[in-house]
């Protein structure tokens, strides 16, 4: 029998960036090299013990063993609403304005299916997290890139979008605190973004996966901006806040119609997250300060020594006040991918090429400080020895 044909859609997608880098890393490891990977944004710090201890009990409860509520239990959604009230001073209706997600990545990629029609454009930040583009393309939409430039502190200049682009666009993705640049946005920026989206009839989807990884003032929410709920939704995740990337728990908050549209889509696609994980999420949110603060401090300490070492080695470094990412240019410039492979072969250190996040990331590298302190120090030492 001839091999059956596969659909064209999956073939049109490049291998997921981080999978390809991981393959390269494995190749080096097989050669016997001691590779330090600072490529993936996946915290090495284990989930704090109080969380795993709570979860162990929740897993044993028979009442948690059946299908969960797809949109999140009433208790989970209420805990989310209470957390936003305390953290941002905003009021959200748990019944209509909050939806539980199985990690924010699936929500980000599914949202365009709920909000746009085939052929509509969606504006995405460039450089940006790859799931925005994937979701837009899979749902039949078109991607318009909004550059994030160093001279603007990696905040977008909405004035760069042409009338033609705006007439076709239905939706805008933003992501602050930002991956990959580490840039932060203040409330004034969110006010401007909300005004812009209201004026141009655009849905605004703001990805706040790194909202709790801040080193100075707590990051604001786009939902604090006046009129935000008319156009905006915001994605939150337990992944980075509590070092829980493997647990897959996140939520969407904001405009009730958009939240309901994604709820309806997801009710047809999945059956929600394991109730024991949702209960653990409630535990995290109710104990937020004591659980998240040590994690912030650990990343901040890494940020201080790694950015100093990189600067001393002649790199141009954008020192962030949020996230665990360092966005930097190598001493002699050049293409991102060349510098990544050079570091891998000469120093056995793996970083992510900025170009993997979009054309405007070209020339930069992203270092993710998700390895034990000693390994990050060793990586910095090895990088410092490269003669560019
Ligand atoms: C900007 C951004 N958004 C969303 C996610 C997805 O996080 P999760 O699906 O674990 O909630 C990531 C993960 O790295 C990210 O970097």
Image (spheres, helix red, strand yellow):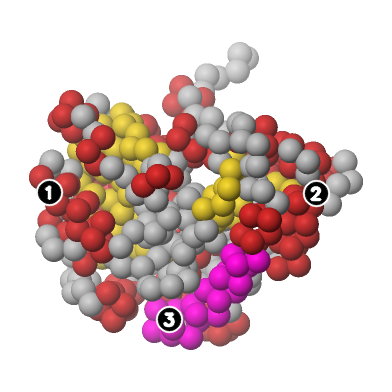
Q: Which residues are magenta?
A: 283-305
Based on the picture, tell me whether residue 287 belongs to the magenta stretch.
yes
- SS class, disc 1: helix
Residue that badge 2 annotates: 385
Look at the picture and state if 98 lies above or below 26.
Answer: below
Rendered residue at 26%/64% (across/down): 187
Q: Which mark is residue 198?
A: 1
Q: 10 Å neighbourhood of mark 1: few (<14), some, or many (≥20)?
A: some
Residue toward you, 47 or 53: 47
Q: 10 Å neighbourhood of mark 3: few (<14), some, or many (≥20)?
A: some
Q: Quadrant of residue 73?
A: bottom left
Residue toward you, 270 or 200: 200
Rounded to the nearest whole Å, what is the CA distance between mark 1 and mark 2?
Answer: 51 Å
Q: Position of residue 188 (x, y in %)?
A: 23, 61
Q: Which label's residue is closer to the chain start, 2 or 3?
A: 3
Would residue 220 appear left or right of 116 to someone viewing this image? right
If the image is split into quadrants, where does the C terminus sit? top right
Residue that badge 3 annotates: 288
Farthest residue, direction right: 32
Q: Is mark 2 within 8 Å of ligand 1?
A: no
Which one is closest to the eye, mark 1 or mark 3? 1
Q: Quadrant of residue 49?
A: bottom right
If the image is split into quadrants, where does the N terminus sit? top right
Q: 10 Å neighbourhood of mark 2: few (<14), some, or many (≥20)?
A: few
């Amino acid at each position: 029998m001839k091999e059956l044909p596969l659909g064209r859609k999956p073939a049109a997608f490049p291998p997921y960036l981080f999978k390809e880098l991981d393959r390269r890393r494995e190749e080096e490891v097989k050669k016997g090299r001691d590779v330090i990977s600072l490529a993936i944004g996946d915290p090495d710090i284990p989930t704090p013990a109080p969380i795993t201890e709570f979860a162990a009990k929740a897993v044993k409860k028979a009442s948690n063993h059946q299908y969960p509520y797809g949109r999140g239990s009433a208790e989970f959604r209420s805990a989310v609403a209470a957390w936003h009230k305390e953290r941002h001073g905003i009021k959200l209706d748990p019944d209509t304005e909050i939806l539980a997600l199985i990690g924010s990545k699936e929500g980000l990629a599914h949202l365009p299916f709920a909000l746009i029609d085939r052929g509509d454009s969606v504006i995405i930040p460039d450089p940006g997290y790859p799931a925005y583009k994937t979701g837009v393309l899979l749902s039949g939409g078109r991607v318009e890139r909004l550059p994030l430039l160093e001279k603007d502190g990696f905040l977008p200049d909405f004035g760069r979008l042409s009338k033609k682009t705006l007439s076709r666009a239905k939706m805008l993705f933003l992501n602050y605190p930002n991956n990959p640049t580490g840039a932060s946005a203040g409330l004034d920026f969110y006010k401007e973004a909300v005004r812009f989206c209201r004026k141009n009839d655009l849905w605004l989807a703001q990805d706040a996966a790194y909202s709790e990884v801040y080193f100075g003032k707590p990051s604001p929410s786009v939902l604090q901006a006046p009129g935000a709920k008319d156009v905006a939704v915001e994605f939150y995740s337990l992944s980075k806040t509590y070092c829980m990337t493997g647990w897959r728990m996140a939520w969407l908050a904001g405009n009730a119609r958009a939240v309901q549209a994604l709820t309806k889509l997801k009710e047809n696609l999945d059956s929600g997250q394991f109730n024991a994980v949702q209960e653990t999420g409630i535990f995290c949110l109710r104990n937020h300060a004591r659980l998240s603060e040590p994690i912030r401090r650990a990343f901040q300490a890494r940020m201080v020594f790694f950015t100093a070492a990189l600067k001393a080695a002649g790199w141009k470094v954008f020192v962030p006040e949020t996230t665990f990412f360092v966005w930097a240019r190598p001493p002699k410039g050049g293409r991102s991918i060349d510098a990544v492979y050079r570091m891998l072969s000469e120093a056995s250190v793996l970083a992510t090429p900025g170009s993997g996040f979009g054309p405007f990331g070209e020339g930069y590298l992203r270092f993710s400080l998700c390895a034990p302190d000693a390994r990050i120090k060793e990586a910095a030492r090895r990088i410092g020895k490269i003669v560019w």
